[in-house]
Image: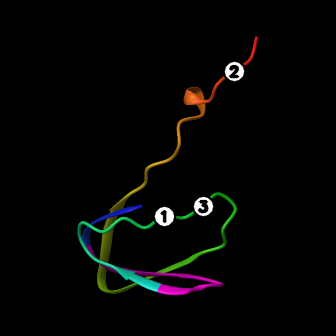
Amino acid sequence: MIVLEGRLSVSTGDGTVTARPGDIVYMPKGEAVTITTEGEGALTAYVTYPHWAEKHEG
């Protein structure tokens, strides 16, 4: 997740990180996360690994 505007916190079983504009937060598949914001919230963009880029046998 890329933070474009604002500030947010991402919590996992390992702890909490705070992200600001320009920061990238990596969240592995299957990881349980809680995302919170303060004030007016945050604007984010999500980037996922493209399934079509996986190597197919055959």
Q: Are marks 3 and 2 in contact (CB under 8 Å)?
A: no
Q: Position of residue 7 (x, y in %)?
A: 30, 80
Is there CB contact under 8 Å for labels 1 and 3?
yes
Which is more N-terminal, label 1 or label 2?
Answer: 1
> What residue is drawn where x is 53% and y is 36%?
50
Vertical side of 27 occupied by 45: above or below: above
What amino acid is labelled 2 in the image?
A: His
The three-letter code of the residue at mark 3 reads Pro
Q: Which residue is mark 1?
A: 26
- Mark 3 vs mark 2, CA separation in Å: 22 Å
Quarter assignment of residue 12: bottom right
Question: How many angstroms separate mark 2 from mark 1 (CA)?
Answer: 26 Å
Q: Does the magenta-highlighted stretch encompass residue 11? A: yes
Q: Tag 3's secondary structure?
A: loop
Q: Which residue occupies 44% across, 83% down?
A: 17
Q: In the figure, residue 51 lies in which quadrant?
A: top right
Q: Residue at x 61, y 85 (%)?
A: 14
In the picture, measured across the screen, residue 41 lies left or right of residue 52, that is: left
In the drawing, what numbered circle is on residue 56?
2
Magenta-span inclusion, residue 28: no
Of the two numbered discs 3 and 2 on the same chain, state the one appearing first in sequence.
3
Using the image, tell me which numbered label, if any, was put on residue 54: none
Magenta residues? Answer: 6-16
Quarter the C terminus occupies? top right
> At x 43% / y 67%, what residue is drawn?
25
Give the residue type at disc 1. Tyr
Q: Position of residue 46 (x, y in %)?
A: 43, 54
| Dots 2, 1 in contact, CB < 8 A | no
Which numbered marker is on residue 28? 3
For the N terminus, the image quarter is: bottom left
Q: Secondary structure at mark 2?
A: loop
Q: Secondary structure at mark 1?
A: loop
